[in-house]
């Protein structure tokens, strides 16, 4: 399986930590495993979890969300550790409660779990005007307080983050007393409608998405696991 840019950077940081001799014996990086820390490091005999983000796309996971027309609620297509974060941020409640997507009005679920949708033959076809209406009513940006992010990672026992191009920071607290600065980037939650197809018949498929992204880079850290700055005092 090919790596994406975030996965490649995570591997790079893991190899740096491994060569420095600060990874736990026999440890591996998380890769695609969402329930594991990206990387772990050992400081004075204690193991700490580290979140790793690359500079090209420092987001916290783009997730698909469906509208359950029967119950008038938004539900995640595939609940996981990231949607847990989004639930803690009350992401579904940020969507206009009066919004009834035309896409879901003209589709019907192919599976009971609402994971696949097909056109409802009894309804008019979904067209480009419908798409523009759904985009206008769904797409928005919302600032997210950093404290919510810190609390989420604290609950996962993760207190440190490495960001490509910015450096090494602590999140909720510098629990290992490394002298790090706290991450002070700015985050926003973006809703968007992804679609395929631009024929006169309208889009072939629409997906309603939520993604938490870094809008503003944090203040450059004094420390970095890469050799561009001073390596943290991990020993």
Image (tube, rainbow, N blue to C red):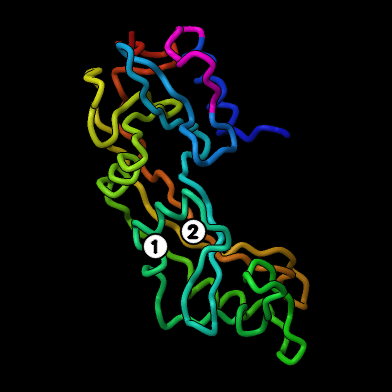
The image quarter containing residue 123 is: bottom right
The image quarter containing residue 164 is: top left
As drawn, the label of residue 91 is: 1
Q: Answer whether residue 22 is magenta in the image.
A: yes
Image spot of residue 198 (x, y percent) = 73, 68
Residue 23 in the image: above or below residue 66: above
Q: Answer whether residue 69 is magenta in the image.
A: no
Q: Quadrant of the N terminus?
A: top right
Instruction: Tell me which segment is drawn in magenta.
Output: 19-29
Residue at (73, 76) in percent of width and height:
118
Q: CA distance from mark 2 to mark 1?
A: 8 Å
Image spot of residue 231 (x, y percent) = 36, 11
Question: Which residue is more in the foreground, 69 or 189?
Answer: 69
Question: Which residue is more in the foreground, 193 or 26?
Answer: 26
Q: Main secondary structure of the magenta part?
A: loop
Residue 158 in the image: above or below residue 145: above
């Amino acid at each position: 399986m090919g790596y994406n840019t975030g996965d490649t950077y995570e591997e790079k940081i893991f190899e740096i930590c491994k060569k420095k001799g600060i990874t736990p014996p026999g440890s591996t990086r998380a890769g695609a495993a969402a329930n594991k820390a990206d990387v772990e490091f050992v400081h004075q005999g204690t193991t700490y979890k580290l979140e790793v983000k690359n500079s090209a796309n420092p987001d916290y996971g783009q997730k698909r969300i469906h509208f359950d027309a029967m119950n008038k609620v938004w539900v995640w297509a595939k609940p996981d550790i990231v949607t847990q974060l989004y639930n803690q941020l009350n992401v579904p409640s940020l969507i206009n409660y009066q919004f009834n997507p035309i896409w879901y009005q003209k589709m019907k679920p192919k599976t009971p779990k609402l994971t696949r949708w097909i056109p409802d033959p009894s309804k008019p076809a979904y067209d480009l005007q419908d798409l523009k209406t759904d985009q206008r009513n769904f797409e928005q940006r919302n600032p997210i307080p950093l404290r919510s992010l810190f609390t989420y990672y604290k609950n996962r026992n993760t207190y440190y983050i490495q960001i490509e191009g910015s450096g090494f920071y602590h999140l909720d607290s510098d629990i290992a007393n490394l002298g790090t600065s706290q991450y002070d980037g700015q985050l926003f939650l973006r809703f968007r409608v992804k679609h395929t197809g631009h024929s006169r018949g309208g889009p072939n498929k629409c997906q309603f998405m939520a993604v938490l992204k870094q809008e503003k880079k944090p203040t450059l850290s004094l420390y970095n696991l890469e050799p561009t700055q001073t390596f943290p005092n991990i020993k």
